[in-house]
Image (cartoon, rainbow, N blue to C red):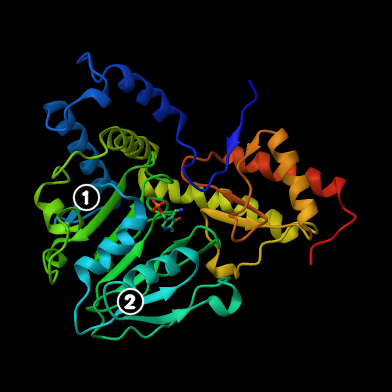
Amino acid sequence: MMTVYNFSAGPSVLPEAVLARAAIGLRDYDGCGMSVMELSHRSKQFRQIIERAEAALRRLMRIPDEYSVLFLQGGASTQFAMVPMNLSRPVAAAAYINTGNWSERAIAEGRLFGPVDVIASSADKNFRYIPRGCRVPPDAAYLHITSNNTLEGTRFADIPETGPVPLVADMSSEILSREIDITKFGLIYAGAQKNIGPAGLTAVIVRTDLVGRQTGNLPTMMRYDVHCEARSLYNTPPCYAIYVAGLVFEWLEQLGGVAAVAELNEAKARVLYDFLDESRLFGNSVERPDRSIMNVPFTTPSDELNEKFLAAAEADGLLTLRGHRLVGGMRASIYNAMPLAGVQRLVEMMHQFEQENSGSSHV
Ligand code: PMP
């Protein structure tokens, strides 16, 4: 069978070793004779699963005790609403930095629940950069950033300093890909389906003193304090997804943790960007200091050539390289589980394609 590499932006590639272990747990968890999917979420086996997953994530990200770790449902999109529902203040605006499509979604949702102040935006250059040096209003309820922009291929290389204002980050497409200082953040959230595990699970890491300060009535399922109190077991959590996430965390620990995978991620991204910077056919238009090491958009000079490339890549086992429908072109998502060999294969194929189609140069 041909080895294929899956460059999907999410749901995306999972480590081979994790899939092999998950396949065992699918039939029989730890010799108990039941599938993980059949276990009661109140059973001792599932408690062990969720506690192990949380402990591993805490070790990996060095999450201090003052933070709660929640395993929720509803995707990152539900967090667009839960953040303002729980953290907004009637008198103070919530500050947002607009760095692309997912920021815009978060901002639109924020506006449903209170005043929003978009303190910076890179819309003027089609989101090809990350705004710098923004002044955060000292009385803002929070500052929300999308730390890695999955469609546009940008990331905050430096995390903004917000002083006493809680910093909230949508880290869906980069969580666990580089070392971060958790204490800079009030709240971090991430849909699991990129660097954590299967779709259906959302990780939230929240400084516990920010929890329980909501004004007015909220639906119970939308309250962080309820989920913190119940340790993610207020209702039935996404059990199987949490199990697989735990396996991914353990895989990452065996690899040497976040520092080790970050080094690998930098190496993978370098291979691809070095090629793009030399290429006469392919190009990436993101400002260099702001390039994402997780999502790398690129194009040829024409839609026709893009289509030809995508077909050739697919025939070569290089899958899901089509750019997001709002952006077009191509995008290689090179999350933690993408091996260096996959990126090298992609670059070899791009190189060959360039030689065969060298009539047109990139503009
Ligand atoms: N934020 C970012 C940065 C994303 O990449 C995505 C999904 N691709 C979302 C939010 C939305 O996530 P979900 O589909 O889990 O709601």
Within 10 Å of the Cα at label 2, are there few (<14), some (14-19), or many (20+) other Cα atoms? some
Left of 86 or right of it: where is 16?
right
Q: Position of residue 288 (x, y in %)?
A: 59, 68
Q: Position of residue 326 (x, y in %)?
A: 59, 60
Secondary-structure class at tag 2: loop
Which numbered disc covers residue 70?
Answer: 1
User: Is the residue marked 1 within 8 Å of ligand 1, measured from its CB?
Assistant: no
Within 10 Å of the Cα at label 1, are there few (<14), some (14-19), or many (20+) other Cα atoms? many
Q: Nearer the viewer, residue 358 or 344?
A: 358
Q: Quadrant of residue 186?
A: bottom left
Left of 122 or right of it: where is 60?
left
Q: Quadrant of ligand 1?
A: bottom left
Q: Earlier in the sequence, mark 1 or mark 2?
A: 1
Secondary-structure class at tag 1: strand
Q: Position of residue 260 (x, y in %)?
A: 42, 46
Query: Callout 1, which amino acid?
Result: Leu
- The quarter in which the N terminus is drawn is top right
Q: Residue at x 31, y 17 (%)?
A: 27
Left of 295 or right of it: where is 285?
right
Q: Residue at x 44, y 69 (%)?
A: 104
Left of 254 or right of it: where is 36?
left
Which numbered disc covers residue 161?
Answer: 2
